[in-house]
Every structure is written in structure tokens, then in C-alpha cells.
Amino acid sequence: MKNKDVFPSDEPGFDSFQDNLVKQATANKVAWVIDAAQLGLLTPLQAKWALNWAICKVKTNATTAQRKAKNQAKAAYKKQLRIFIKGQIQGNVNMTDDERILCGVTPHKTTRTPAVKPDTTPTVTVETTNGEVAHIFCKQQQGNDGSSLRAKPDGIKKVKVVYIVSATAPASPAACINTVYSGKTKITLQFDVADAGKKFYGFACWVNSKDEQGPWSVLFSGSVS
């Protein structure tokens, strides 16, 4: 997932955000050891934004040229604000996370979220094609988050599939001699030409980033074309 933008998406929200940020940084520049030169670079850009935003607040009162000028002023201001936030707020060792929040800036996480051991099983669909190939599709069970999508659950890194070509169904996953991992929920099994017409059986499970696996799915099967 992509990181959420530091700036509000709407222009009234952006205007409130920048106003608060600059006010807080100015009022606390000594305590937070804010670089005066960096803060000074924001002043003319903020003034230009404020002037153009005042004209364009009511869209029906602004011309196309005025809206273009407002957008250009905003883009230039945001570019410098990003530099300022990165160096003077997020990267400032003299500030606490509460002080960053006071500026409207969400602190960066300093620790990773622990990997949760999978506790659900995939629902498996088998699709065979011409030739010695079968496609295995895995998704969440009905009733779990994401059950309508072919997507891995949150915290899951890959899918593990074990399978065997056999005349009889295996008693457990341990009896399956072939193993395939995939970061996607579509897994392709490739068989030998000599396996054509034979049955294959298998099981699937979710695996997290620590290589901890969840419970096995019910047995699935198909025929090698």
C-alpha cells in the first residue's frame, strides 16, 4: 500500500494545513531549532498561494487563467513544503512525535508491525488447460475479509502449495512430494508429459513474512490434460 500523502487532498484542507504548519514552526523555531533559512523559503511561496487562493475560493468567480495561476502557486509551494517537512519536521531530532502531530504531520513509524501468524485457510479453485499445466487460484474463505477477491489476506506474503500425481488421494499434506511457493494467488503447476491423463491432488496454505504458515486447505484435485 502506498503511504498517505502528507497534504489533505482538498484545497481548503491544504490551506488550513499549511497555515497551521508555518505558524507552529515559526512560533517554536527556537525550541525546535528550525533552520531560519528553510523557514524563510516558505514565506514568498505562502504569500503567493494565499493571494491566488483568495481569488479562487469561489470557483464561479475565477477565470481559467486565475485557476491556472492558483494551481501553479500551489504546486511550487507544496514542493518546498515537502522539503521543509522532511528535513525540519520529520527528520528533526529536537522535536517529539506529539510536536509533529501539533504541526499536522503524522510521525513516521520507527518499528515494524509484527507479522501475525495466519489463522485462515485458502479456498482453492483448480483450472486445467491443454497441455501439462494446471492453474491453482487461492482466495479467502467466505465470511473473511477479502473473500470476494483473489487477493492475499493482510500480512500474508505468499501461498504455499503441495501436490502429488497419484492414483489415490493422499492422506495428508505430508504425503505430497512437490512444493510450490508464489507471491501471487494464482499458482501454475507444470507436469511431465508422462503425467497426461493422470490425477493430481494437493493442499494450500497462507505464509507470512516470517515464513510461518497457516492451516492447510481442504484437499483439492484435478486431471492432467
Image (spheres, rainbow, N blue to C red):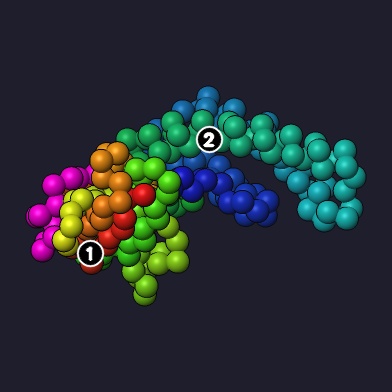
Magenta includes 198? no
Q: Pinpoint residue 52: horizontal percent, then vertical percent.
A: 78, 42
Amino acid type at circle 2 is: Arg
Q: Is residue 143 above or below residue 26?
A: below
Q: Pinpoint residue 94: horizontal percent, then vertical percent.
A: 33, 37
Identity of the residue drawn at 74% across and 39% down? 71
Magenta residues (range): 170-180
Res. 103 in view: no
Between the C-alphas of marks 2 and 1, the distance is 52 Å
Residue nearest the viewer, comparing 24 with 129: 129
**Which mark sits nearer the N-terminus, 2 or 1?**
2
Identity of the residue drawn at 36% across and 58% down? 126
User: Which residue appears farthest toward the bottom when viewing the image?
Assistant: 143
Identity of the residue drawn at 52% across and 40% down? 26
Query: Left or right of 117: which side holds 135?
Result: right
- Helix, strand, or loop for circle 2? helix
Residue nearest the viewer, comparing 37 with 87: 87
Single out the mark in the foreground, 2 or 1. 1
Q: Pinpoint residue 14: horizontal percent, then vertical percent.
A: 62, 49
Amino acid type at circle 1 is: Leu
Residue at image mark 2: 82
Residue nearest the viewer, comparing 48 with 163: 163
Magenta includes 176? yes
Residue at image mark 1: 219
